[in-house]
Image: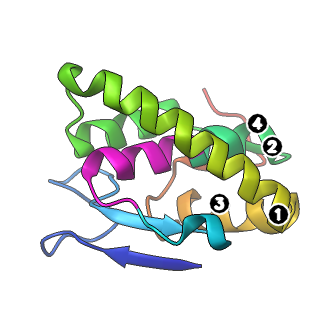
Amino acid sequence: MTQRSVARGRTPATHAGRPGIAMVVLVLAGPAFAQAPTSPLDNYADAATTTIIAEQSCPGVQMKAGQLTNLRLAARVNTGQEPALQEKLRTRATQVRQQLAEVGRDAWCANALAAFGPEGTVARGVLVPNRFVR
């Protein structure tokens, strides 16, 4: 797993006192991800797509929607960016599904949980393993 921080002195887990992605890029594995996201919008699309697909694909993993909302706020996504965000989400979803197929569900899920789980290296607590989330 490779990650790169392009933030200005912020840690991956916080942004203005809130949980957030703080401009951290997650590349789980594979040649489809040679070019990492470079903008807050790209970072949010990466986090949203990865966590949503993890909830759908990884047994016993749930996404905390409130944490994903915090990531969106931290990325400062505004309504004028919605068309671009929708396109980025579609593109990223295709890439993530391809990656999931290439590396296998178990490895992909472990990496997604490592990045977005309770001790996440990209954003903590967006994914919760084996427990009920309200």
Pick whichever, 2 or 124, lies toward us: 2
Residue 95, image x and y in percent? 63, 50
Circle 1 residue: 102
Q: Is residue 71 above or below residue 24?
A: above
* Residue 60 in view here: yes
Read off the residue under disc 2: 57
Disc 4 marks a residue whose amino acid type is Gln
Q: CA distance from mark 3 to mark 4?
A: 12 Å
Q: Pick the residue in front: 10 or 130.
A: 10
Q: Which amino acid type is shown beneath numbered disc 3?
A: Ala
Whole-number angstrom distance, CA of label 4 to CA of label 1: 17 Å
Image quarter of the N terminus:
bottom right
SS at mark 1?
helix
Residue depth check, mark 1 versus mark 3: number of the one nearer the observer = 1
Is residue 29 something one can see in this rendering? Answer: no
Q: Which mark is residue 56?
A: 4
What is the quadrant of residue 55 in the picture? top right
Q: Judge left or right: residue 45 versus residue 34.
A: left
- Give coordinates of residue 14: x percent, y percent: 27, 60
Query: How much space separates mark 1 and mark 2, taking CA atoms?
Result: 14 Å
| Residues packed near mark 1 inside 10 Å, few (<14), some (14 to 19) or many (20 plus) | some
Residue contact at pointers 2 and 4, CB within 8 angstroms:
yes
Amino acid of disc 1:
Glu
Question: Main SS type for the magenta part?
Answer: helix
Question: What's the magenta region?
Answer: 37-49
Residue behind mark 3: 112
